[in-house]
């Protein structure tokens, strides 16, 4: 009973989630005003073998929840599930106009765009 009371809803430990087997490329954007959140999260994701190709600030910095966009359209579903579980992100299926620049900006676009919300600061990495 005491153990149940003390348990929190933090993300799964690294040993509980397997690392990815494909070469999933991720952009991590800070959707908050919390300094260093994108870099902290990027370091955690590297432990799962994600390739972090960019960190920075999102255009909107008022996100409460962490969200992820899948630019592979399901071709890297296993990596997507690991990313969602590790970051506690919710997948969005809309396609804002700014996503187009990631799809067409270079020859090797990212597979996933992760936008961190304020709740990400509460995760223990």
Image (cartoon, rainbow, N blue to C red):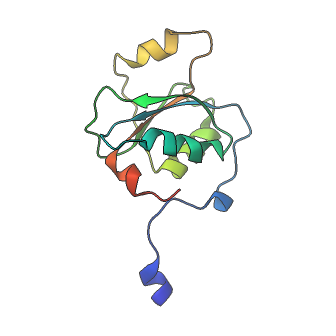
Q: Locate residue 38: give its quadrant.
A: top left
Residue 56, how many percent across, how many down?
43, 29
Q: In the figure, is residue 99 to the left or right of 112? A: left
Closer to us: 123 or 73: 123
Camera sees residue 1: no
Residue displayed at 32% across by 48% down: 118
Which residue is the extreme one toward the right? Answer: 21
Q: In the figure, is residue 66 to the left or right of 103? A: left
Q: Quick check: 6 above or below 60?
A: below
Residue 6, how many percent across, how many down?
44, 80
Residue 90, how many percent across, how many down?
41, 44
Residue displayed at 56% across by 9% down: 106
Which residue is the extreme one toward the front? Answer: 35
Closer to us: 88 or 44: 44
Which residue is the extreme one toward the bottom? Answer: 1
- How many marks do you count on the picture? 0
Residue displayed at 42% across by 83% down: 5
Q: Quick check: 107 above or below 124?
A: above
Residue displayed at 54% across by 40% down: 42
Closer to us: 59 or 78: 59
Camera sees residue 6: yes
């Amino acid at each position: 009973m005491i153990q149940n009371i003390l348990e929190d809803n933090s993300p799964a430990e690294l040993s509980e989630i397997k690392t990815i087997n494909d070469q999933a490329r991720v952009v991590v954007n800070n959707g908050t005003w919390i300094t260093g959140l994108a870099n902290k999260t990027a370091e955690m994701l590297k432990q799962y073998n994600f390739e972090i190709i960019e960190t920075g600030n999102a255009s909107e910095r008022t996100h409460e929840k962490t969200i992820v966009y899948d630019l592979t359209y399901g071709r890297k579903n296993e990596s997507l599930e690991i990313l969602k579980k590790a970051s506690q992100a919710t997948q969005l299926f809309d396609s804002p106009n700014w996503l187009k620049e990631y799809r067409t900006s270079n020859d090797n676009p990212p597979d996933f765009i992760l936008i961190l919300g304020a709740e990400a600061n509460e995760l223990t990495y």
